[in-house]
Amino acid sequence: MILKITDQLMEYMIRHKAIDAQKQEIVDFYRYGVEITISSLLNVILILVLAGLFGCFPEGLLFLGVFIPIRQFTGGFHAQSYFRCNTMFCLCFISTLLLYKITFASVWWPVLLGLLIADLGIVLKYCPIPNENKPIVGKMRILKLKMISAFLFLAYGAVGIILTVQGIQCGVLLVYTLQLIILLAVAALVAQRIRRQGRNSADR
């Protein structure tokens, strides 16, 4: 579906000369941008629909408000197709929401604080994690993204801990969403290592 909509939009832009069809690199650049935008919008819609069905619309908004801004800077695991990406994102939200609903009344805030400290260490050491389709060029840009990622983790994490200490339940969901971002970052690192080992084995 995403590819069909992208094709229609690209044809429209080329037909109205918004894009020069003779410059393939530019066409590919716009196509990738359109695909990502449509997929991202679909992800947002799916999460809001699921949150509405579960009667947790505010929680859905909080999840998106934490996940989307930070993920832009940290990077992380990406599925190999848009369908898998949308499905995985929905499953991640449902899993995070269920964990929150089951544990928010019994979670101990020092445990959350310890997790956030470990998260910050991972962010500082490994983030941003580049996507093969979207490489990060330049040491200064990498450093900038790393610092922004660390700042956002500190800011969101501090808010989550403060809310939890004050007995405000959504603070736990905020911290759990940060854990999800780190899990996806670690998954990306593992996937990259497996691919490198596979290429090295093939070269021997």
Image (spheres, helix red, strand yellow):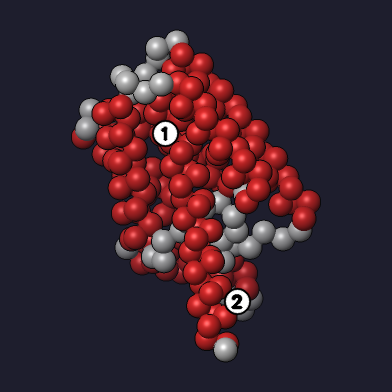
Please, is residue 139 above or below residue 56 in the view? Answer: below
Which SS class for mark 1?
helix
Q: Which mark is residue 30?
A: none
- Mark toward the start of the polypeptide (1 vs 2): 2
Which residue lies most toward the bottom here? 204
Please, is residue 74 above or below residue 115 in the view? Answer: below
Quadrant, the C terminus: bottom right
Q: Looking at the rendering, which quadrant does residue 23 occupy?
A: bottom right
* Circle 1 crowding by C-alpha within 10 Å: few under 14, some 14–19, many from 20: many
Q: Position of residue 29 (x, y in %)?
A: 59, 66
> Which residue in the structure is indicated by mark 1?
176
Please, is residue 162 above or below residue 116 in the view? Answer: above
Q: Position of residue 105 (x, y in %)?
A: 31, 19
* Circle 2 crowding by C-alpha within 10 Å: few under 14, some 14–19, many from 20: few
Residue at the (45%, 10%) spot, across then down:
166
Q: Which mark is residue 24?
A: 2
Q: Where is residue 6 in the image (x, y as percent from the top left)?
A: 43, 64
Amino acid type at image mark 2 = Gln
**Whether residue 30 is visible:** no
**Whether residue 164 is visible:** yes
Give left or right: position of 22 versus 15. right
Amino acid type at image mark 1 = Tyr
Please, is residue 192 above or below residue 200 in the view? Answer: above
Quadrant, the N terminus: bottom left
Q: Considering depth in this image, is 95 or 141 the residue closer to the camera?
A: 95
Residue at the (54%, 80%) spot, across then down:
199
Report how far apart the C-alphas of labels 1 and 2 lie in the structure.
42 Å
* Total count of labels: 2
Which SS class for mark 2?
helix
Q: Where is residue 20 in the image (x, y as percent from the top left)?
A: 61, 71
